Amino acid sequence: MSKKNLRGAVAILTLFFAAVLMTVNHNVSYENRIPSLIIVGLFAIGGGLFPFSHKPRIEDEERERCLTYTKAVGNISAFWDREATLFNNTLVRYLDSITESPVAASEVCKAANRLVQAAKEVIHRHEPIQPIPDAALQMQSAYIAFLISLKDWAESTLEAMETLANGLTPHYEYVQQLMEERESAWHEVQTEEKKLLGRLGLSTPEIKALLKQIHSSLNAAENDSWQPKPCTCEFSNSAK
């Protein structure tokens, strides 16, 4: 593959991943970012932006269990948000020189490998959340499907970065297909989440309490002790 074509591929991939990462991280400042999961539903309920579910209102113990589940999911989302930000920062710094600098190639591939491990970690963290109240089963099912699609997308991203680092053209269509599947799965999560939150009939104090908990989750995620397994990504020859 010629150097000219490689640079063209890098330019295309840079724009492509910039668009992808905009769906993962909506703001640059980590401290000002709130996981989109549950927060979209909270603001929609508070502002009356969508009709409440026609299903019966969730009450008593099941209501509390649903709130516990949404908070647990919020913690997982905060962790993923941190990891996606780390990947984004590395990509912005090194992607333009990935085909010419072995250091850049190594850093990007290490970051992509960490992203894959983080995607697997969020699945691992979601699995022990039990018991799931009946009213939250549809949201749980949607969220599991989303997490699986997230892992598949992260793995395709790693493969694309390694391919590019070796001076070859990645399979863009496959990465894009998985990105679209991930976005579709995320839309389903948001839909089910709004239905669930609508049935909870949250009061203003409860909404404020959840918002406070989300900010606490962000702070906790920043200090999360999780570390990926070490990976060796060495590229001795840059693309010419």
Image (tube, rainbow, N blue to C red):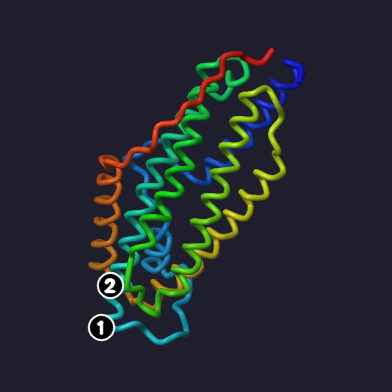
Nearer to me, 153 or 204: 153
Checking the image for residue 140, the label placed there is none
> In terms of sequence position, does the residue under pointer 2 or pointer 1 come before the other?
1
9 displayed left or right of 124: right
Residue identifier under label 1: 60
Q: Most extreme residue toward the bottom, as rendered?
A: 56
Q: Give the residue at mark 2.
A: 203
- Please give left or right for residue 65 compared with residue 10 in the image: left
From the viewer's side, name the closer residue of 32 and 185. 185
Q: Quadrant of residue 198?
A: bottom left
The residue type indicated by label 1 comes to Asp
Q: Position of residue 194 (x, y in %)?
A: 45, 69
Q: Nearer the viewer, residue 170 or 212?
A: 170
> Looking at the image, which residue is at 47% across and 26% down?
232
From what the image shows, is residue 108 above or below residue 101?
A: below
Residue type, mark 2 in image: Ser
Residue 145 position, x and y percent, is 53, 62
- Rendering coords of residue 234 (x, y %): 52, 21
Q: What residue is at 33 percent from the left and 65 percent from the top?
A: 129
